[in-house]
Amino acid sequence: MNAFKTLILLAMATLFLNGCTSKLHMLNVIWYDGEDGKTTFHEYLKRANPIAAKYGAHLHSELYASTNDAFDFNPDLLFVVQYPSFGGMFSVLTDDEFEEIFELRAKGAKRKILTSCDVDDSFPTVDGKIAILNMVDLKWNISYETYKKDYLEPLQIIANQYSGGLRTAIYLPKLSVQGNMAMDADVIFVQSFIDENAYSAYLDSQELHSLEKNLVNLIGEKVVQPIKTTLL
């Protein structure tokens, strides 16, 4: 199975990037092959979860489904899986049961990106009814450390004032090695707000507008792509 062998090669490449003993975080970005593909892919997830759990792997993020068609890069599903080590990931990929169900993944997704990612979990997180997925391309203009200090940290303060904040850790995708689309986002994070009114007030706030102007000065253009999502 070519797709399965690709995953094995991905695991081997990840070994050299992360070492055998460190935790691995794999970002999955999925576009369904129609409604039937959606059903098929979720059947794959349902059957894959207990297999992964045998080797200490689990979802590090929630499952985020986009509800906004305004952008070209608009995946149907995005999630992150944490593996305890390279060995744990390799064990999942070579498990006989997993290989049997892997065809469901191939049939369910017409496009997919699978890439390792770093995780910044230094921010406190909040819960809320509204979830906003943000994908950011830094355009090689600034480092993540600068972006965090000059944008993310003040953004968190502003969101807190409107009953919001980060919902999950921040994910930093590495170069995509599988998939037929480029992974242009350097930073991915999800915000959460208590309700629509809180989110609208946040969007209208002068503090946010000023911060966005500062970001344009840093990077050269507006690069934050907010996408309203539903949680699965």
Image (cartoon, grey):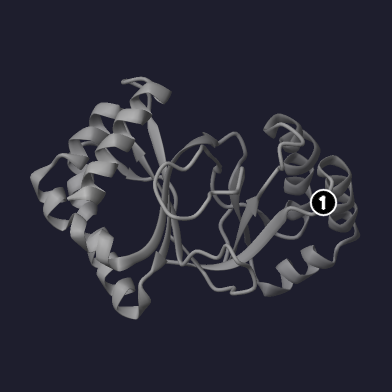
Residue count near mark 1 (Cα–Cα under 10 Å), binned few <14, some 14–19, many ≥20: few
Which residue, as the protein is rendered here, is positioned at the far bottom?
35
Task: For residue 92, say whether it is visible.
Answer: yes
Q: Provide residue 43's location: percent of width, then percent of height.
A: 23, 66
Q: Horizontally, is 212 left or right of 87 in the view? A: right
Which residue is painted at 42% across and 24% down in the image?
17
Q: Horizontally, is 82 left or right of 182 in the view? A: left
Q: Provide residue 161's location: percent of width, then percent of height.
A: 78, 55
Q: Provide residue 210's location: percent of width, then percent of height.
A: 90, 53
Q: Is residue 223 above or below residue 33?
A: above
Q: Quadrant of the C terminus?
A: bottom left
Looking at the image, which is closer to me, 17 or 83?
17
Which residue is painted at 66% across and 61% down in the image?
226
- Kindly state the secondary structure of the residue where label 1 is placed: loop
Q: Provide residue 87's location: percent of width, then percent of height.
A: 24, 27
Task: For residue 47, say whether it is visible.
Answer: no
Q: Is residue 216 above or below residue 103?
A: above
Q: Horizontally, is 232 left or right of 44 in the view? A: right
Number of numbered discs overlaid on the protein picture: 1
Residue for badge 1: 221
Q: Quadrant of residue 22?
A: top left
Residue type at tag 1: Glu
Which residue is painted at 47% across and 43% down in the image?
176
